[in-house]
Each structure stands twice: as structure tokens, then as C-alpha cells.
Image (spheres, helix red, strand yellow):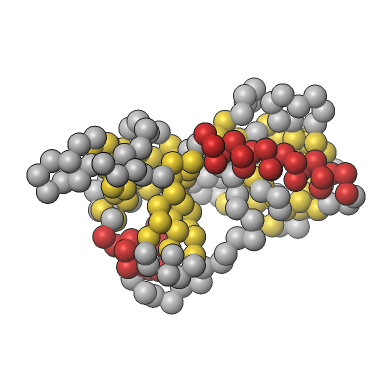
Amino acid sequence: MATALEITPTVVIELADRRAFLGCFYHQGNLGGVFVPGHMSLSPGTRVLLELVFVAEKRTLRARGVVRWQRTRSARNLAAGVGIEFAPQERRTRDLILDFANGRNVQVVASRARRLPVRLAVGYATESVMLSDLTDDISEGGLFICTEELFEIGTKLNLRLKPPGHLFAIQVVGEVMWRQGEGRRGVGVRFVFEGGHAKHRIDRLIEKLRERVQSEMEFRPTED
């Protein structure tokens, strides 16, 4: 169980339009990856969250990845940059991004709130079971719990979040909205606020987490 706050670095890539993604996608590796030109202080092996911002289409798509290599200097026709490979569990997301980039008619659901790639200890209980695991991301509206217990959609959970440095845990009701049985196993849960106190504490937590992610763990490539 995590005793300190763990944040997955976020790599933000702004693309002029959907076709621009095809210019930075490469096919090496299991699922291929994205070449990010410029300089970033991320070492090979670092797990990251890719945030692809398609400016013309006003869409943002996200996928998990791993930094595989880094070219610190430009050489001949090769620009300096970082190669980020899609994580093994992201095959469906990679396919959706490629379909979108190729102009195919795909349904891209815009999230109402930006999920922060933060791992926190979370306890959760139903009428028959009490468990403890980790979140994989969190927002004002809900969180994803990494768990082998794939609850039925609609299951109500009594959640107990204990962020590092907080004296008291945050208790809130959650409802299972979706579940994932392959790759990143777990359940997506939305918060069900039964009073203003829990919502206020969640909002304050998310505000502090967002500030920390943006100031410490959000990377945008810089040019020479």
C-alpha cells in the first residue's frame, strides 16, 4: 500500500490537427509509439500518461505509455526527442487514436473532468466485503480503483481516501460505472455526494493535486 503520494508524469503534446499525429507515430515495439521532438527530463523506463491535444478538432485523448529511448542531440536528419511506446493494455486506445487520426468516424467521448494520474490508498466496502487498494486516477467526479474485484455496474461502495499528510480520511459514497478485466484491471467509480461536506473535501483535494501535477509532473517538450 502506498505511504507517499505517487504521481505518473504527464506528457502534453499539442497537435495542429488529427493528421499531425500520423507524422509522429512510429511502428516499432509491441504497439508502436509516439516520437516527441524536443527535450524532456524523462529517463527510459519511466511510465507516463500521454495527453494528445488536437487543436483543430478541440479534442484531447489520453493513453498510458513508457519512455523507451531518448535522443538528446540532433544528428543528421534525426531530431532530438523522446520515444514513448504505448503501454501493453492500451491497444484499444491506440487503435481509437489511429482511427481518429486517419479521419474515420469514431466516437470520442469528452471527459467532463480531467482525471489526474495519481495513486492514493483507498479503502472500499460493500455490504459483504471490505477491501483496500490503490487509485490509478482521480477527478472531481470519480476515480479508478486498481482491483481484482470487478464489482457489477451499479454497485455502491463506501469509499475511504487517506491522502498522505492528511490527518483524517475522506469518506464518500461511490457507484461503479464501468469495469475493465484486461490490462489495467479495476473499476471506474463516480462519486455520489450525499452532502456538501464530502464534496467540499474532494474538491479541495483535487485542487491541491492538480496544482502539484501541473507544477511538478507535467512535461511539455522544449526545443533547442
Q: Is residue 31 in view?
A: yes
Q: Is residue 6 left or right of residue 159?
A: left
**Quadrant hosting residue 164:** top right
Instruction: Please state the horizontal and vertical placement of residue 199, each as a whole percent of the image.
Output: 81, 47
On-image quarter of the C terminus: top left
Instruction: Please state the horizontal and vertical placement of residue 16, each as a whole percent of the image.
Output: 37, 64
The outermost residue toward the front is 224
The outermost residue toward the left is 76
Q: Residue at x 56, y 50 (%)?
A: 181
Q: Is residue 14 left or right of residue 208?
A: left
Instruction: Please state the horizontal and vertical placement of residue 138, each as a whole percent of the image.
Output: 64, 45
Instruction: Please state the horizontal and vertical placement of residue 36, each as a whole percent of the image.
Output: 31, 48
Residue closest to the eye, 121 or 12:
12
Q: Residue at x 80, y 36 (%)?
A: 170
Residue closest to the eye, 172 or 12:
12
Q: Residue at x 69, y 43 (%)?
A: 206
